[in-house]
């Protein structure tokens, strides 16, 4: 049973120990992450799936870290003592491999014993930042770490449908986090430089999520996507595929771009689940 799908940004600067004095510049996002984590906690999931754009990307398909225990720290950002962990749910992984056997998009398993794919137990920051907030909220359950592939949006959407089949067969409450930032080009000095179309991309995507316009997301103008310099669209495509059968109640909890990168926090509630909108939603980019 799919209980909730979250969309979460992953800037390490929103980790309080890392952001320190600059944390208040992204306070909407910090508050949004805590609200999303609270909502996930309320659903009492037994499994947590993280979809990230920053793990090891391979040509053959979406990569899944197959080691029994996954861990990571923020050492590359100067804070090796901040650690997060995720235990792999082996049963869900095995079901997914079986469910995808006849599909053109199949997961690629990365693990310690795979001599061609090292690093099968190391979490990336795209997973670690949401996990930090989830674990702060008391969500500490086994799960699965999935990295996007460069397959088409339609193929990633179909892969999401296959994941949903595996979730149903697993038969326990599952929460999903699609980790990704929006445009990295919102203003001069932004990490990927400035492009005025970055704001246009963010406005459109936040609007499409708010209105639940899946087809519009699947068919976004590719020149706009490229100009925006985003990293969140592919994880969102996979998550939307999981929600195809149930549909969803969309809730944008917060949006801001204080450092030139768009941070959207959203909760997508499957229509077969109870839903009560938060009073803390911030709406779109211009609010």
Image: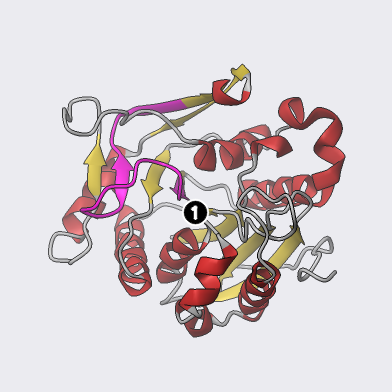
Residue depicted at x 63% and y 20%: 78
Residue depicted at x 68% and y 54%: 261
Left or right for 53, reference 42: left
Left or right for 164, reference 41: left
Residue 272 in view of the camera: no
Q: The C terminus appears in which quarter of the rendering? A: bottom right
Magenta-colored stretch includes residue 214: no
Residue 242 in view of the camera: yes
Q: Nearer the viewer, residue 108 or 47?
A: 108
Tell me residue 138's x, y (percent): 64, 35
Q: Is residue 130 above or below residue 165?
A: above
Magenta-colored stretch includes residue 59: yes
**Quick one: which residue is furthest to the left in this view?**
102
Q: Is residue 32 above or below residue 216?
A: above
Name the quadrant containing residue 114: top left
Name the quadrant containing residue 103: bottom left
Q: The N terminus appears in which quarter of the rendering? A: bottom left
Residue depicted at x 35% and y 28%: 121
Q: Read off the magenta span.
A: 49-71
Question: Which residue has dot 1 on it?
Answer: 176
Q: Is residue 129 above or below residue 5?
A: above
Mark 1 closeness class: few <14, some 14–19, many ≥20 residues within 10 Å: many
Q: Nearer the viewer, residue 202 or 110?
A: 202
Tell me residue 75's x, y (percent): 56, 20
Q: How is the image coloured?
A: secondary structure
Name the quadrant containing residue 241: bottom left
Tell me residue 224's x, y (percent): 55, 74
Q: How many marks?
A: 1
Q: Secondary structure at mark 1?
A: strand
Left or right for 107, reference 245: left
């Amino acid at each position: 049973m799919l209980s909730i799908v979250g969309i979460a940004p992953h800037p390490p600067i929103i980790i309080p120990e890392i952001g320190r004095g600059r944390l208040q510049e992204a306070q909407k996002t910090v508050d949004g992450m805590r609200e999303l984590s609270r909502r996930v906690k309320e659903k009492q999931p037994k499994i947590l799936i993280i979809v990230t754009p920053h793990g090891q990307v391979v040509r053959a398909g979406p990569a899944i870290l197959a080691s029994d225990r996954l861990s990571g720290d923020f050492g590359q950002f100067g804070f090796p003592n901040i650690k997060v962990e995720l235990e792999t749910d082996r049963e869900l992984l095995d079901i997914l491999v079986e469910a995808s056997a006849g599909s053109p998009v199949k997961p690629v398993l990365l693990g310690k014993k795979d001599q061609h794919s090292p690093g099968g137990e190391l979490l990336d920051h795209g997973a670690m930042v949401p996990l930090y907030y989830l674990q702060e909220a008391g969500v500490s359950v086994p799960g699965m770490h999935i990295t996007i592939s460069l397959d088409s949006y339609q193929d990633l959407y179909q892969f999401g449908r296959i994941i949903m089949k595996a979730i149903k067969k697993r038969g326990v409450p599952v929460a999903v986090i699609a980790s990704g930032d929006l445009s990295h080009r919102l203003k001069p000095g932004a990490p990927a430089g400035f492009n005025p179309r970055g704001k246009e991309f963010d406005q459109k995507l936040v609007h499409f999520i708010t209105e639940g316009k899946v087809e519009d997301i699947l068919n976004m103008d590719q020149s706009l996507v490229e100009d925006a310099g985003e990293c969140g669209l592919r994880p969102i495509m996979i998550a939307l595929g999981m929600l195809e059968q149930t549909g969803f109640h969309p809730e944008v909890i917060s949006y801001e771009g204080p450092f030139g990168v768009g941070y959207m926090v959203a909760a997508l509630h499957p229509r077969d689940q109870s839903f009560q909108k938060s009073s803390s939603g911030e709406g779109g980019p211009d609010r």
